Amino acid sequence: MIKAGGTLVKRSNCLVFFFEGGKLRCKNYFTGMEFEASPVLVSILAKLHRWRSLREIERLFPASSSAAMRSYLRELVALTVVMVRGGSQSKREGELSAWDTWGVEARFFHYASRNVHSAPVSIDEVSFNRALRRRRVPPPPVKAYRGRPRINLPDPSRHSRDQLPEVLLARRTHRSFGAGSVSLEQLSILLRLTWGFTSFIRWPGLGRLPVKTSPSGGARHSLEVYLWCLRVAGLAPGIYHYRADRHQLELLRRAEVKGRVGMLCGYQEWVRNCSALFVMTSVLARVMWRYQNSRAYRVVLLEAGHFCQTFCLVATWLGLAPFCTAALFDEKIERDLRLHADEPVLYAAGVGMPSMK
Ligand SMILES: Cc1cc2nc3c(=O)[nH]c(=O)nc-3n(C[C@H](O)[C@H](O)[C@H](O)COP(=O)(O)O)c2cc1C
């Protein structure tokens, strides 16, 4: 609502302008709103860098009538280009200052690529992929240099019965699960060997830093893990946080979460049959404290990959059925966990009992 008195408006802090097909486009990367813009909009928004009342704005643009200006502002508010002070957009955007250290680029990529699964995805995988193939031949899965000398390597298969290669070779993504529950002991091993502190190292100038089984840029270990417990023997269904230093679970909410996890994982309904879902987040401040450039955001994402692979291997070694998914409704998960922009959701992995085939 834009009223003559009282209401204060300001341009959004999350706007990017770019040319596409010769047209200027404006995107609010936080709300996802994108539209064709006129260059005039840029000069108007330039003046809305701070909270302004309607009267002030009318004085800044005397050529427009009050009614026309009010209607234009209403349109800009609907497009989330302009926000109203005290409104939900201004409150939510305010939290994004947690990303300021890494400039626009890290938060642009994070938020612009956040909500891609807005509805249940019900595609027929076979016809979808056949249609893709018809449109364009898929790129080959290998790169080969023609005309270069090739050196045959010794056959590594004689090691394939050793424990580590056996686990590596056995790891697969599972999407169906058997009956029964994961034991509390298996859960404990999964947590300790993936996310638990395993020892300490001395870091120059910082003293003792905890380390885990996966590497972490600068040993910052920004990742946290939350457990959605569905079917673990001896552990009530609900949402837990893993306390990495003490190897403990902190109960956040007791609840039947089976009906919710599929939706949280981009409506992949098979997830509801798993035993436990592990969602990784990052406490950005731990990394930003040491690394102030936006490349550090890559480090955070890479790190999540390391942890997920460790998780999948530990689960495979335990004879369990692991999976991972990046098709997440970050916003809904963050709401369930009451998290804010300073601890974004990154990645999820889960585990169930293997199904009998
Ligand atoms: C970052 C990442 C995200 C993934 N997201 C999904 C997902 O949303 N749903 C799914 O079924 N599999 C997902 N997968 C698993 C891949 O589909 C799977 O690794 C691939 O089919 C190869 O099978 P494999 O893991 O058994 O080798 C993901 C894998 C990675 C690395």
Image: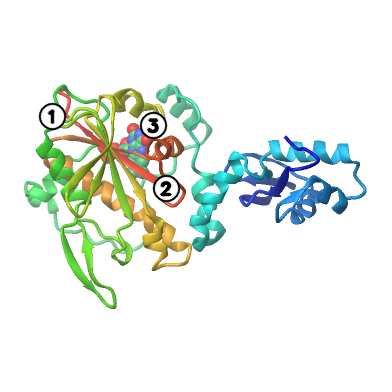
Residue at the disc numbered 1? 233
Task: Tell me the CA gap for discs 2 and 1.
Answer: 30 Å
Residue beneath the point at 91% across and 50% down = 62
Question: Which kind of residue does numbered mark 3 sit on?
Answer: Leu
Of labels 1 and 3, earlier in sequence is: 1
In the image, is 2 to the left or to the right of 125?
right
Task: Tell me the CA gap for discs 2 and 3.
Answer: 15 Å
In the image, is 57 to the left or to the right of 263?
right
Using the rendered image of the protein, determine whether residue 32 is visible from the camera's viewpoint.
no
Between 124 and 275, the one nearer to me in the picture: 275
Of labels 2 and 1, earlier in sequence is: 1
Task: Tell me the CA gap for discs 1 and 3.
Answer: 23 Å
| Within-10-Å neighbours for mark 3: few <14, some 14–19, many 20+ | many
Residue beneath the point at 18% across and 65% down = 200
Check the image and report above or below for 58 versus 104.
above
Question: Which kind of residue does numbered mark 1 sit on?
Answer: Ala
Q: Nearer the viewer, mark 1 or mark 3?
A: 1
Q: Residue 344 bears which disc, if any?
A: 2
Question: Which kind of residue does numbered mark 2 sit on?
Answer: Pro
